[in-house]
Image (cartoon, rainbow, N blue to C red):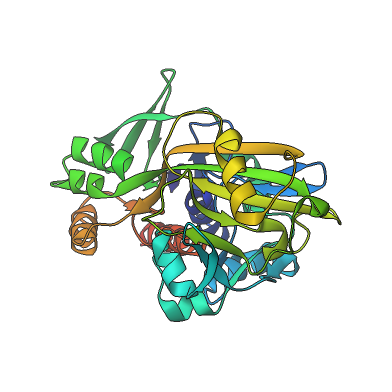
Amino acid sequence: MKVVVVGAGIAGLAAAWELVQAGGCDVTVLESERRAGGVIVSERVDGFVVEGGPDAFLAGETDLPELAGALGIGDRIVSQQARGTSVWTGAALAPIDEGRAAAMLGIEASKSAVSVGFRSFAGGMYEPVAALAARLGSVLRFAQGVAGLARAGSGWRLAVTGGSAHDVEAVVLAVPAYVAGRILEAVGVTHARSLEDVLYAPSITVSLAYRETQLARALEGSGFVVNPDVAGQIRACTYASAKFPGRAPQGSVLLRAFLAPGDGDPAGRAHPELVRILGIRGEPLWSRPFYWNRGLPRYRAAHQKQLEEVRHRLSRLPPLAIAGAGYDGAGVSACVRSGRAAGRLIAQLASR
């Protein structure tokens, strides 16, 4: 069976990995960008590890560690070092329950799940993406966006930007919900546009490097959130160099600020507030901003019911599955679980 996976975020890569492992499928992954990973980005800058997207996964979730073990990088997982979160009241940093802090940041997880802490990879969250991409090799096709999907006999025809097409028996759409909704509606999946109800919130972050001697006092905990009633540029800040090992050279500090929507240089917006909150002296050694116009998905109350209805309608079509952060959970481990489930579903249909 020929299968195309649309999207090389970690959900699409996990789906392709599952299909390749199952055997019996000729798999191709089409990605519109020139890199894999989607919003997962890890960069090395002067000995620092800078995250552009998610920096961790919930320690109690097993899906990503299981995949990492299968990829031979299980020993690269590192546990959270610093624990505890504060809230900036506008006048001082005060301790806050970690579950409440997570909720303020839009992290959809129970208090008990957050209380276990977080884990990451020694070289950053891009490590499992890189390992999957290396294993999949020539299966990956970059700069090939899908312009349309149509029924073709007992299978599908995918039109690719540039004029080419793929005729296949099965498809995995590992794309944002607003993209999948439009594609599925075009092939007659009733009410598929309900997937567009998933709101993808914009995200602006900036990582700033300092020398330890620039801080008036040692950092306590893993970061802080800002009380919503407090006006300012920063909504939260992670002490990246304290949260996980190996994020900064000795004698250095790496901070990651999450900013409210606004114009101007992110570092220029964040640094003055960090000076006031943390007592920083002097300018940052360097800074690195990241912008995601559509970053973290947020589900509406009817999401699960709408998703079940869409998947029920998909079951009546030639093999077609959806996977990713817009459907089964926004965390990285949840995306892995969603992708592998989609891959298993298509593999089962291929074996019939």
Total number of numbered labels?
A: 0
Q: Nearer the viewer, residue 229 or 141?
A: 229
Which residue occupies the foreground of this view, 278 or 85? 278
The quadrant of the picture occupied by the C terminus is: bottom left
Expressed as whole percent of the image width and height from the top left, the position of residue 53 reads 55, 48
User: Residue 189: x, y in percent?
Assistant: 17, 45
Residue 104 shown left or right of residue 141 in the figure: left
Write the residue at 53% across / 77% down: 60
Give the percent coordinates (x, y) of residue 19.
Answer: 50, 56
Q: Outermost residue toward the front?
A: 91
- Which image quadrant is residue 146 in? top left
Q: Residue furthest top?
A: 162
Task: Determine the residue located farthest toward the left in the rendered image.
Answer: 190
Q: Name the foreground residue: 136 vs 300.
A: 300
Asked if residue 322 shows in the view, the reply is no
- Say above or below: 323 vs 263: below
Q: Is residue 92 left or right of residue 71?
A: left
Which residue is drawn at the image coordinates 35% and 45% (left, top)? 200
Give the answer, above or below, for where 190 lies relative to 160: below
- Closest to the observer, 153 or 345: 345
Q: Is residue 275 visible?
A: yes
Residue in the image at 32% along x and 51% along y: 319
Q: Is residue 239 left or right of residue 168?
A: right
Q: Position of residue 80 (x, y in %)?
A: 66, 70
